[in-house]
Image (tube, rainbow, N blue to C red):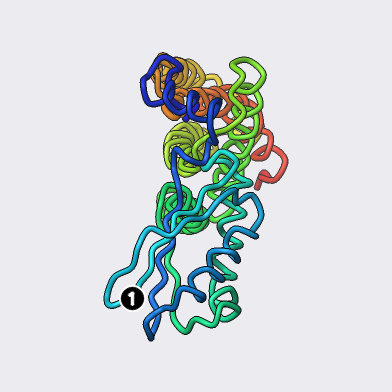
């Protein structure tokens, strides 16, 4: 909820509920029990008591039954912020133990969970899978294209290694600075995925420009001299493009939605790192260090 401006009605209403009642009332979790046989009152009471005994749960109430008593619905309220990490962790543990709780209540069937907290858990799990899949696939694909373009194996490895280092640095530094400068200590789980896609694509462009010029100069000069010329000849273009692009993404910081603001800031930081540190120092240093004159 903090990702929205403080004067928006949804956030203002949430803060009133959290202050006067329980913050969990804003987004209760719905628990659906689907049993093989009609549920008795005793079974439902025992299951509700088991739910209420779980960490952070403040109250549980039954909302009704369907399918001749085989399906029962419960509303589960957490005492803490339903969007907080600790609440999500608590519900994730509860979901994993649902079959055990049903068995203890004498119920043969399945339990299903819905609501904002449950959706956030699924979203977090998907994001964790996505970031791994995207990092692997994009790295392998770009590496293959670089090998084809440069007709080299070592040079693409330098390029990809520096870009990955730049991404991790931008993410860490960006999150540290948003907390230090703007007081934002939380961020959307989608930001690392979006930032990786943009930073890798943009950073590789700058490295391709530098390496292409280096390979041209390498035909006439030793490694060190070729690197000096390549950096000097491409520096102005890359620096200008990097500054313009960083400023473009920094405009997102003016948006009232925190997700866009943090994403714009992290991407701008990453572009500046690529422009002045990776392209200007790290990649040329690796080329001079590992490439040998023939």
Q: Local crowd at mark 1 within 10 Å, few (<14), some, or many (≥20)?
A: some
Q: Position of residue 216 (x, y in %)?
A: 47, 36
Does residue 154 appear anywhere in the picture? Answer: yes
Of residues 289 and 186, the one drawn nearer to the viewer in this rendering: 186
Of residues 195 and 29, the one drawn nearer to the viewer in this rendering: 29
Does dot 1 land on a helix, a strand or a loop? loop
According to the picture, the residue beneath numbered tag 1 turns out to be 69
Give the residue displayed 59% in from the left and 48% down from the top: 58
In the visual, does 96 lie left or right of 11? right
Tally of marks: 1
Does residue 135 appear anywhere in the picture? Answer: no
Of residues 62 and 246, the one drawn nearer to the viewer in this rendering: 62
Give the residue displayed 35% in from the left and 72% down from the top: 71
Up-down: is 111 above or below 286? below
Q: Which residue lies furthest to the left in this view?
A: 67
Q: Where is residue 33 in the image (x, y as percent from the top left)?
A: 42, 71
Give the residue displayed 59% in from the left and 27% down from the top: 174
Q: Position of residue 35 (x, y in %)?
A: 40, 80
Where on the picture, by quarter, is residue 163? Answer: top right
Up-down: is 116 above or below 185? below
Up-down: is 19 above or below 152? above
Q: Which residue lies furthest to the front in this view?
A: 41
Give the residue displayed 39% in from the left and 63% down from the top: 73
In the visual, does 173 lie left or right of 10? right
Q: Where is residue 281 in the image (x, y as percent from the top left)?
A: 65, 27
């Amino acid at each position: 909820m903090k990702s929205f401006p403080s004067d928006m009605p949804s956030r203002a209403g949430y803060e009133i509920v959290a202050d006067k009642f329980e913050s969990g009332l804003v987004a209760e979790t719905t628990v659906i029990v689907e049993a093989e046989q009609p549920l008795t009152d005793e079974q439902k009471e025992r299951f509700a008591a088991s739910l209420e005994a779980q960490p952070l749960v403040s109250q549980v109430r039954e909302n009704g039954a369907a399918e001749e008593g085989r399906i029962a619905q419960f509303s589960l309220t957490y005492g803490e912020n339903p969007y907080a990490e600790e609440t999500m962790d608590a519900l994730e543990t509860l979901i994993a133990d649902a079959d055990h709780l049903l068995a203890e209540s004498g119920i043969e069937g399945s339990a299903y969970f819905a609501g904002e907290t449950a959706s956030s858990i699924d979203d977090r799990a998907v994001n964790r899978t996505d970031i791994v899949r995207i990092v692997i696939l994009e790295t392998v694909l770009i590496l293959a294209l670089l090998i084809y373009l440069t007709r080299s194996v070592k040079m693409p490895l330098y390029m990809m290694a520096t870009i990955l280092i730049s991404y991790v640095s931008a993410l860490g530094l960006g999150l540290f600075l948003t907390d230090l400068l703007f007081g934002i200590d939380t961020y959307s789980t989608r930001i690392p995925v979006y930032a990786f896609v943009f930073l890798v694509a943009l950073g590789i462009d700058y490295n391709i420009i530098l390496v292409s010029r280096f390979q041209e100069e390498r035909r006439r000069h030793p490694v060190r001299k070729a690197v000096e010329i390549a950096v000097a000849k491409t520096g102005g273009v890359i620096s200008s493009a990097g500054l313009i692009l960083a400023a473009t993404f920094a405009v997102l910081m003016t948006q009232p939605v925190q997700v866009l603001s943090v994403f714009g800031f992290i991407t701008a930081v990453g572009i500046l790192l690529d422009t002045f540190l990776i392209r200007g120092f790290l990649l040329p240093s690796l080329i001079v260090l590992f490439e040998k004159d023939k």
